[in-house]
Image (cartoon, rainbow, N blue to C red):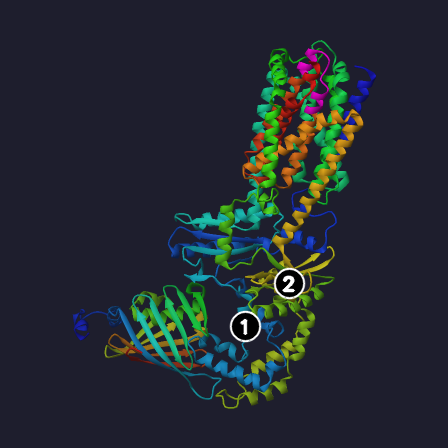
Amino acid sequence: MVALVFALPAHADPLDELMQRLAQVKSAQGKYLERKHLAMLDAPLDSSGTLLYVAPGRLEKHMLSPRRESLILDGDTLVIESKGQRRTFALQEHPVIWAFAESIRSTLKGDLATLQRFYEVRLEGDAAAWRLRLRPKDSRMRQAASEISLGGSGAWVDRIEVQEAGGDRSVTQITRGAS
Amino acid sequence: MTRATRWALGAWLALLLACIAVIARTPFTTDLSAFLPRSPSPVQQALVEQLRDGVVSRLILIGIEGDAPARLAGISRNVGAALRDSGRFASVNNGAPSGFEGDRELIWRYRYLLSPAVSTERFSAEALHESLRELLAQLASPTGALLQRLAAADPSGELLLLVDQFTPQARPRIDEGVWFSKDGGRALLLAQTRAPASDIDAQKAALDRVRESFAQAASGTDARLIVTGPGVFSVVSRERIREDAWRLSLIGSVLIAAMLIALYRSVRVLGLGFLPVASGALAGIAAVSLAFGSVHGITVAFGVTLIGEAVDYAIYLFTQNAPGSAPETTFERIWPTLRLGMLTSVCGFSAMLFSEFTGLAQLGLFSVAGLVVAAAVTRWVLPALLPRGFAVSAVPAVAPRVLAAVHAAPRLRVALLVVLAGAAVFLIARPQPLWSASLTSLNPVSAAEQALDRQLRDDLGAPDVSYLVVIAEADQQAALQAAEKAGATLRDAMARGWLQGFESPAAYLPSEAMQRARQAALPAPDTLRRNLQAAQKGLPFRAGAFEPFVRDVSAAAALPLLDRARLQGTSLGLRVDSLLVQRASGWNAMLPLRGVSDVKALAAALPAGALLDLRQEFDRLYGGYLREAMINSLLGAAAIGALLFASLRSPRRVFDVAAPLAAAALATCGLLALAGVELSIFHLVGLVLVVAVGSNYSLFFDRQGPSGADRGRTVVSLLFAAVTTVIGFGLLAFSKIPVLSAIGSTVGLGAAMALVFSAIMSRQESRAA
């Protein structure tokens, strides 16, 4: 990985560099712990499970606790499996869900063009500890989330933070490894 | 022109004008009312209304196949959007979020009046505690973000419950965001037209819209369109019947006209020959209009063929007119026979007058009136218009050969007897019934198309056309309440596995009583706050987090009730419009059923007569018609026997006239059965026509004139008449439309055999010898 970074031209834009680095990853697997801070709750709400990414377009989120629920993003459809039911959504018809989905998927894919279609993208930090801050362009999306930020090091994303308009906030930590 | 002829011409013209005046004000119908009994039972009424106007008969099933799934999905989305925009459909579903999205605000506001879960129990501290625990789990989940904003106002999740209830219960597989068949090769859409199935013009417009929007969406791809459904089938059938009837009758008319012009060598005489038929048809339509108030398209189409016998009258007159003699002289000889032949036909057709089957009764009246007028025009109008001294010059050339054949015919008597005995034995001995008990035998839709329809229906989980709960009540509210009661029974039945699902108007518009009961079940704000406080114990929800819920519940308790006016223009309103309809006698609520597996148990659980098995009811109705038509035909045959006996006054001569007809009917049935045809009610109508047309042949054989020349002319006229009949009807036999081919094959075969058998059985030759 380090060799790869050095192989890049020295004058390249750091954002492009990050994207190219991320684009090299063909698949990744990890465990996540998500903590939601909701205005209606006195205490934070925790959930955990596994994440799986397969280039170019498949992203699976399997919540295992407090109960099982799966979100499978593939191409332009989103499948939600919970309580034995399976629902399918076409992303084009749900702009807000689509924007959410692309914030993570396009980052993992290193697809800056798609990211910039939905967000104003800003990069902070360096290759060892970077933070990608996404501000929604669409007003409907801004009502749902005021900012999404993804942090990581190298080609690994280890933290996703969603700041919602109503003051609610969620923080997801991701650790490497198969479930 | 004598005074009498002038009177006759004047009376004829006056009659024509009167007929035209009546017809100008006649409503012509093309719907299924022809199949409705004249005094229908409530079930039969409901049955025909369902077929004509029912929610299930408005479905159009659409499949798109033949290209990559992503392309098919794109086409499906575009077609769906175009159809929704067209305004011709009450609903269009293809798996993409349906029209209910647009009603979200209405459903949100009325959620506590619409939700079947609302009860006092639902808002108790214990139940709320369970709801909140569930909510917490949902909030934690990946989809929690979608609920977060609604949670404070809807902790018990009524909105999700309603959205689930309103989206079609059976969902096909979804790929690329739209419905696909199980094998993934075909994108699926299910549309419901606004117009009733019986409005074939509107159905055609809807079908055209489907085809156009597909053509637009699919240009440049390899995709193919499949469209089926009851409305589509009626459009296609009508087109086919029109095409076939038009094409075949055009060919038939050209052939017959060519033959007649070769014989008559006079365009004027050819034209005169059609006067009796045309006058008879006008009189027939006018008579039906006066008696029934409207005329069915079927009556006109088949009535005109039934009085095809009237073409023969002119042929008899023109061909039997001896050179140099006046038509009046010819009539002195042939009129008694012609009149008896006409009366025989009238006897046969009047049996149909008493049919409960409206279509058949109209057909009977049409034929009786038409034949009487056609015979009268032949007798009193044609002689005045026929050129002086007209004679068919071909007769002397043809006559000797025809006479020789007739002379030789009786030698075939033994062979005929053997054939008839064989036919009788074959008909009695064959294991399968001769008459088809099901109306599907008349379905102009091919078996392949029906199989495709079943396949699409299966893929879509669309309601079966067969089963439906119909509730008839005096007013709308009573109908909705009864639908709610039936709905409870059906949910029970679903739990027992008797059916997979159903739809009800009360789901979209609960009865006022139900809405009031739900309002009454909503707790007062203070009670609800207390219950919430207790429910939140041990859960991390902040105190007062659910104030929006308390506010909405108390607002719902005071909401004006949901009614049709408020649903106007929403997709919920469209669903209600199609499931709750006003009838002459009151209001009908309809609950289409899906995946019925135990009809008997369902029928027993529901109020008597509420479950309608459309196919079975229709077959039962048709079976009744068929039995009745057979009895009427036998009565008609008895009347013909009595008429013949009264005029011929000799059992032997009655036998001579009737035997060839009975033999022709028997042999026709035998031949059709041998060809594997299942006989239907239209074959029976055809047999009556065979007797009507054939009676002229056997009567003329019975009364052959004294001189050899007259005998020759008579026999030649019979031959010409029979050839026109066989051409006209024989062509119909080649139609792919079962009704047309039934009548065509029966009459074509029967008329030919009636002539041949009359010759074989005639005693004249042996008597003369």
- Among the two numbered marks 2 and 1 on one chain, the one whose residue lies closer to the N terminus: 1
Residue B707 is inside the magenta segment? yes
| Residue appearing at x 63%, y 68% in the figure | B487
In the rendered image, residue A164, in percent from the top left (x then y), is placed at 43, 78
Query: Quick one: B340 or B188, which is closer to the camera?
Result: B340
Residue at 66% of width from left, 72% of height from top?
B515
Q: Which mark is residue B161?
A: 1
Of residue A123 and residue B469, the one placed in the foreground of this image is B469
Confirm whether residue A128 shows in the render. Answer: yes
Q: Where residue A51 sits in the image (x, y, percent)?
A: 34, 75
Quadrant position of residue A141: bottom left
- Asked whether, in this view, residue B569 is left or right of residue A156, the answer is right
Q: Amino acid at mark 2?
A: Ala
Whether residue B450 sits left or right of residue A178 in the image: it is right
Q: Residue at x 48, y 76 (%)?
A: B147
Q: Mark 2 or mark 1, which is nearer to you?
A: 2
Mark 1: amino acid: Leu
Residue occupying image coordinates x 72% and y 27%: B655
Where is residue B67? Give x, y as percent.
38, 52
Q: Residues within 10 Å of mark 2 (few under 14, many from 20)?
A: some
> How many residues crowd mark 1 within 10 Å: few (<14), some (14–19), many (20+)?
some
Dot 1 falls on a residue whose secondary structure is helix
Q: Is residue B325 left or right of residue A50?
A: right
Query: Mark 2 and mark 1: span between their CA atoms?
Result: 29 Å
Q: Is residue B98 left or right of residue B17?
A: left
Residue B603, numbered label: 2
Where disc 2 sits, the SS reads: helix
Q: Chain of mark 2?
A: B
Span highlighted in magenta in the image? B697-713
